[in-house]
Image (cartoon, rainbow, N blue to C red):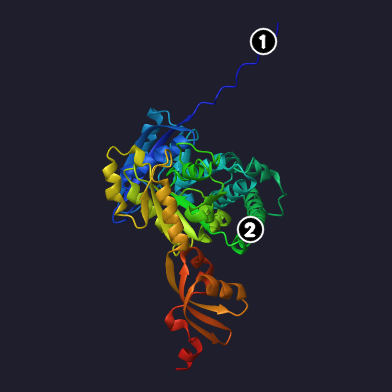
Amino acid sequence: MTKKNPKPTTPPRERAFLVGVEIYQQEGLLSLEDSLNELALLADTAGLDVVGELTQRLNRPNAKTFIGSGKVAELKALAEETLAQVVVFDDELSPRHQRELEPILGQNVRILDRTALILDIFAQHANTSEGMLQVELAQYEYFLPRLTRAWTHLARQAGGGGGRAGSVGGVGLRGPGETQLEVDRRVVRKRIAHLKAELEKVRSHRMRHRNKRKKARLPVVALVGYTNAGKSTLLNRLTEADVYVADRLFATLDPTTRRVELPGGYLSLFTDTVGFIQKLPTTLVAAFRATLEEIAEADLLLHVVDISHPNALNHFQAVQQTLGEIGAGHIPVVTALNKVDQLSDPETARQIVKDYPQSVAISARNGTGVPDLLQLTQQALYETYTPILVRLPYQQGQLISLFHEAGQIERVEHKRGGVVMQGRLPGRLVAQFVEWQISPDDENPKEKETA
């Protein structure tokens, strides 16, 4: 009689201790308490059990250890008392901070900051080859300045690329007088260059697809919002898609595009994108350039806000700030105030709508308000016209024709090198003309210079 193979056991979750710092006269979108609560959710998503937290208010971060020396001693004692295996800081630590803290807290305690934690979550949730490339690039760019003699430290933490991050450590031989650390850095830089080249191919591929969509004249609506606001649930509701949904931060990373029919029989493409968060790591913004361009090239942004969250307005502001940073601040926005089914008083939602421009209160889960949202989207794409002044080179004949066909023209002037067109365009088309947009003072630059 053969024994059945025992079921695989889930590895125990690591115990994490959180550290938050509030810098005087440095305003954040969230309070220290709320930011630490969000960090706890991130830790849970990453598979960590939070066993305690420590906070400090400072005029400025300590140059050596980020927190004061007294707090470092207190942190060491609390970490030992709670048997913490990981200490997570709510802000990004400099390489020096990590080097100074590691010997104090001991070899058995790993030190992570908010950026490293988010990178770890992204590594766990990236499912497509594109997503893995983007995460791996972000990891390498984050770890390069933090690289020390212990290559295994990098190999252990930067494993988001299907094991690729740790596998390159043995590549290459040392030249005369070259230390192992220099070899490691050279290998990492080479890998970064390779990943950037691969992602440039992805970017070119996406650009070709966007150009095809523009020729088909199908407007693109990009769903944006704070992480866990309900974007994927809304896309599933609108299209009966099967996008993965979970009540966790960053449950989906890879963009999903589906066709949606709007009132009046108009067709559009809705794209679900990666969620935003306060203190979004700059390495991620850079690495996810190809994905974020899907947002910057959209005709309309559908901003999904979890209206049941106590920090809904702060989340809204964090997303608006990030949209500006990635060059999407000019795109028209419709706001979906989601999760009204979780509010105790529905009247609250009707009052809140007044505080958000172009908004509708909805529940993506049960469908409340979704028809009104589609109606508002249709109006924003096809009925709302935006004033615009552009100078289009004669080589942009397609855009000149598009302005004549779909726009309301007030003035056309043919000048050397291009045509100046002033008028109004449907919201869905504005993004295509932004590159050529000018102010009245820019119309005759040569004449102005002569004067």
Question: N-terminal of the two: label 1 or label 2?
Answer: 1
Label drawn at residue 209 = 2
Comparing 329 with 179, the one in front is 329
341 over 201 or under it: above or below: above
* Amino acid carrying mark 1 in the image: Lys
Q: How many marks overall? A: 2
On the rendered structure, is 171 left or right of 95? right
The residue lying at 50 percent from left, 35 percent from top is 107
Q: How far apart are the alpha carbons under marks 1 and 2?
A: 54 Å
Q: Which residue is mark 1?
A: 3
Label drawn at residue 219 = none
451 over 24 or under it: above or below: below
Q: Position of residue 386 (x, y in %)?
A: 43, 69
40 over 265 or under it: above or below: above
Residue 436 visible in the picture: yes
Q: Position of residue 372 (x, y in %)?
A: 40, 50
